[in-house]
Image (cartoon, rainbow, N blue to C red):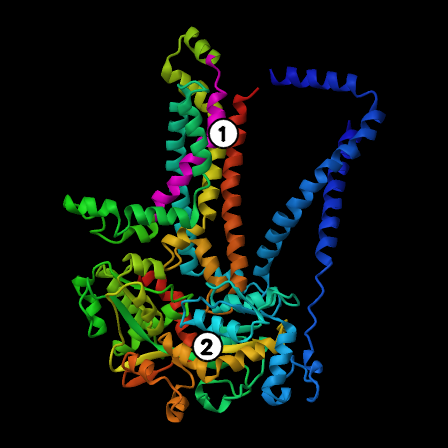
């Protein structure tokens, strides 16, 4: 099937490619439309990233040094990378599964229904609702002096009996899920909607059941989108800073907080360039995750003609 | 086909190249550096002083010349001065009232000392660079090359140990590390080990992270000296907070005026003047400075060597070290640097001085060597100790 369509492509291209002159004249002008966006990306994304990451190669006096990169091997720093990774992976996994379940539930509701449009709009807002406001929402709702804790303690349940978990690393899981699940709903809903009912009908006519439909048709088709959404959720959680800074900043348990400590500490000085090395470390982790995603993509490509 | 591919790729690359060229040319046209106003030349009698290099009031000739030069500049940038920190709000307002011709721009009130220096470096040459700094000792010692030497008129009143001999930085106010608590909910702690008791479960917070903030660093220092350790080795203090965490008494939320007022952080380790400022939000808030060994810390004033408004910066310093403002700091609960000299001269506000918590018998201030060793130790051990 693949080779036939490829041969077909070659034929059509060789037929249509007889007049290169008009196409060559049109191309450069069309590409000029890209200049503003390219300029924006270069100034605000590429240039700062390159500058920030390469400060890790220099020391305070401006000399080239590998000290900052060897400092990445410090047990405290490695611990924070591990914390960031497991926290991001956990919230991305739970968020992906829960978000996918919400999308699946929404499939049964017609597109124009008020519930559907409300959930879509709400997901769009809540996906960006992070930072200090989110931390405050959780402190007000579940903190030591909150209404929920008062109600529960009157029922005899002490939410903080073991420790003040809300202000430590486990306390970040619920706030992160608060924006991870809506983000999953936004990014994954189109993929679920792309499953055609004709495939379900074809599955039934060929003698399959619900189990075979999911295992052999829907899941392989959805896998690339699911993996891409998981990657997005992972990246979102990995780089989240403001929520953790407001809620669990004591001890700088995750990498963005370590970067803050290296840049703005007034007690442990001279570590500004370490922040560049830490940023480089974060990019390295993301590169590893994206490689895994690319491998999954390549495997899932088998299911596409 | 290959020709089309190449021209398409060329088109894309040329677009990015044009964009990059435009972007870089935009960056290259830097803003014209603000010329320091040599407004002193407008004064009739005195020789024109260059405000950028003036090292004391004598270089200007008289206070009137300094005031004229500052008014000619018309503006002053201050940074990292929260209005409720040691009564800075009242001090800034007093300066504005005395010199209405000078617009005071209060930048970034909540940044740390290290960020003040970074702001000066990032805004180098621009009109928005900070003119004056109020920094902790560690940051001041590390960044002397950023400061311009200036000795205020009352220089002799500042204790020698608390100022730089060249005049690059000088102490302005200080306080003792204290524990503030809500007396309606918690008993008064008489010693630091009282805080390990079950009555304080989930209640004790410190103002920031010791690897970042000076106030939190000092809290560990206080714990060190109060549990029998010495300032050469902060591990006694780290152990105390580790014990506090294991007892379930340590609250890891960041302390702000709002968390104290709402009751989220009912027991707080903080400077005595900051703890004192919470009394107006909470009637039952009390402050205790543990007797015996006290951990003190002074903040320091400095002038930016590349200040966009050098005369106004120097006028601000003269203003801060006048009797009026030293008493305003006292009103904020802090100990002004000229307190000893003013008490001898009788210019100190006696009522306010008496209202300060009793000073402990022994005052300990960490030296530069002790601070950097402690900073290193905290960087290695703090996160694991309070997990």
The residue drawn where x is 45% and y is 37% is A125
State which quarter of the image contains the N terminus of chain B.
top right
* Residue closer to the observer: A69 or B138: B138
Answer above or below: position of A297 versus A211. below
State which quarter of the image contains the C terminus of chain B.
bottom left
From the top left corner, tell me how far across and down residue A13 is, in percent.
Answer: 75, 20
Viewer can see residue B239: yes
Query: Position of B265 compared to A223: left or right?
Result: left
Q: CA distance from mark 1 to mark 2?
A: 54 Å
Where, by quadrant of the figure, is residue B252 drawn?
A: bottom left
Q: Residues within 10 Å of mark 2 (few under 14, many from 20)?
A: many
Answer above or below: position of A155 versus A279. above
Number of disc labels? 2
From the top left corner, tell me how far across and down residue B132 is, in percent.
Answer: 55, 73
Are discs 1 and 2 both within one chain?
no
From the top left corner, tell me how far across and down residue B323 is, in percent.
Answer: 45, 84
Q: Is residue A173 magenta-colored?
A: yes
From the top left corner, tell me how far across and down residue B149 is, in percent.
Answer: 58, 83
Viewer can see residue A184: no
Kindly report the secondary structure that dominates the magenta region of the rendered protein: helix
Element type where label 1 sits in the image? helix
| Region rendered in magenta | A172-197
* Residue closer to the observer: A44 or B107: B107
The residue drawn where x is 40% and y is 8% is A207
In the image, which disc is placed on residue B137?
Answer: 2
Q: Is residue A294 magenta-colored?
A: no
In the image, which disc is placed on residue A225?
Answer: 1
Q: Residues within 10 Å of mark 1 (few under 14, many from 20)?
A: some
Where, by quadrant of the figure, is residue B48 drawn?
A: bottom right
């Amino acid at each position: 099937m693949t080779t036939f369509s490829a041969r077909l492509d070659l034929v059509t291209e060789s037929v249509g490619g007889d007049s290169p002159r008009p196409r060559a004249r049109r191309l450069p002008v069309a590409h000029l439309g890209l200049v503003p966006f390219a300029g924006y990306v270069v100034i605000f994304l590429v240039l700062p990233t390159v500058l920030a990451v390469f400060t890790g190669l220099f020391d305070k006096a401006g000399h080239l040094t590998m000290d900052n990169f060897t400092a990445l091997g410090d047990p405290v720093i490695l611990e924070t990378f591990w914390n960031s990774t497991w926290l991001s992976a956990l919230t991305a996994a739970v968020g992906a599964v829960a978000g996918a379940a919400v999308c699946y539930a929404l499939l049964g509701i017609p597109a124009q229904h008020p519930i559907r449009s409300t959930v879509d709009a709400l997901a769009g807002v809540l996906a960006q609702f992070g930072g200090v406001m989110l931390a405050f929402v959780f402190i007000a709702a579940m903190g030591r002096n909150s209404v929920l804790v008062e109600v529960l303690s009157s029922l005899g349940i002490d939410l903080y009996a073991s420790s003040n978990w809300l202000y430590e690393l486990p306390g970040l899981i619920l706030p992160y899920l608060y924006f991870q699940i809506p983000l999953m709903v936004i990014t994954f809903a189109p993929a679920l909607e792309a499953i055609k009912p004709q495939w379900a009908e074809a599955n039934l006519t060929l003698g399959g059941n619900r189990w075979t439909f999911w295992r052999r048709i829907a899941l392989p088709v959805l896998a690339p989108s699911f993996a891409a959404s998981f990657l997005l959720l992972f990246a979102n959680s990995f780089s989240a800073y403001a929520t953790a800074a407001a809620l669990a900043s004591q001890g700088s348990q995750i990498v963005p907080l370590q970067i803050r400590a290296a840049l703005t500490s007034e007690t442990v000085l001279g570590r500004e360039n370490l922040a560049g090395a830490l940023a480089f470390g974060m990019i390295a982790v993301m590169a590893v995750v994206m490689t895994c995603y690319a491998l999954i993509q390549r495997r899932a490509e088998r299911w596409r003609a | 086909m290959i020709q089309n591919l190449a021209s398409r790729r060329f088109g894309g690359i040329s677009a990015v190249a044009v964009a990059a060229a435009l972007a870089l040319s935009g960056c290259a046209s830097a803003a014209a550096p603000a010329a320091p106003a040599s407004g002193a030349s407008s004064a009739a009698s005195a020789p024109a002083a260059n405000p950028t290099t003036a090292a004391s009031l004598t270089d200007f000739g008289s206070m009137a010349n300094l005031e004229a030069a500052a008014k000619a500049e018309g503006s002053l940038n201050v940074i990292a001065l929260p209005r409720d920190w040691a009564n800075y709000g009242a001090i800034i307002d007093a300066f504005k009232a005395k010199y209405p011709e000078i617009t005071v721009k209060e930048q970034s009130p909540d940044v740390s000392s290290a960020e003040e220096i970074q702001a000066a470096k990032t805004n180098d040459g621009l009109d928005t660079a900070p003119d004056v700094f109020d920094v902790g000792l560690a940051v001041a010692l590390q960044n002397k090359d950023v400061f311009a030497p200036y000795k205020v008129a009352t220089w002799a009143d500042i204790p020698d140990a608390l100022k730089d001999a060249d005049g690059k930085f000088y102490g302005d106010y200080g306080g003792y590390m204290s524990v503030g608590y809500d007396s309606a909910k918690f008993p008064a702690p008489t010693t630091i080990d009282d805080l390990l008791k079950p009555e304080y479960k989930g209640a004790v917070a410190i103002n920031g992270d010791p690897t970042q903030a000076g106030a939190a660093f000092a809290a560990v220092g206080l714990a060190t000296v109060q549990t029998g350790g010495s300032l050469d080795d902060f591990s006694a203090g780290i152990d105390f907070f580790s014990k506090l965490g294991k007892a379930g008494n340590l609250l890891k939320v960041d302390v702000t005026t709002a968390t104290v007022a709402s009751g989220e952080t009912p027991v707080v380790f903080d400077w005595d003047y900051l703890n004192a400022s919470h009394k107006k939000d909470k009637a039952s808030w009390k402050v205790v400075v543990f007797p015996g060994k006290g951990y003190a810390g002074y903040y320091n004033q400095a002038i930016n060597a590349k200040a966009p408004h050098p005369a106004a910066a120097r006028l601000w310093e003269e203003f801060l070290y006048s009797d009026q403002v030293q008493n305003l700091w006292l009103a904020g609960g802090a100990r002004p640097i000229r307190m000893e000299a003013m008490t001898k001269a009788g210019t100190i506000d006696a009522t306010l001085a008496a209202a300060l918590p009793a000073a402990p018998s022994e005052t300990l201030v960490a030296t530069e060597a002790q601070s950097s060793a402690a900073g290193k130790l905290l960087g290695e051990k703090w996160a694991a100790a309070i997990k």
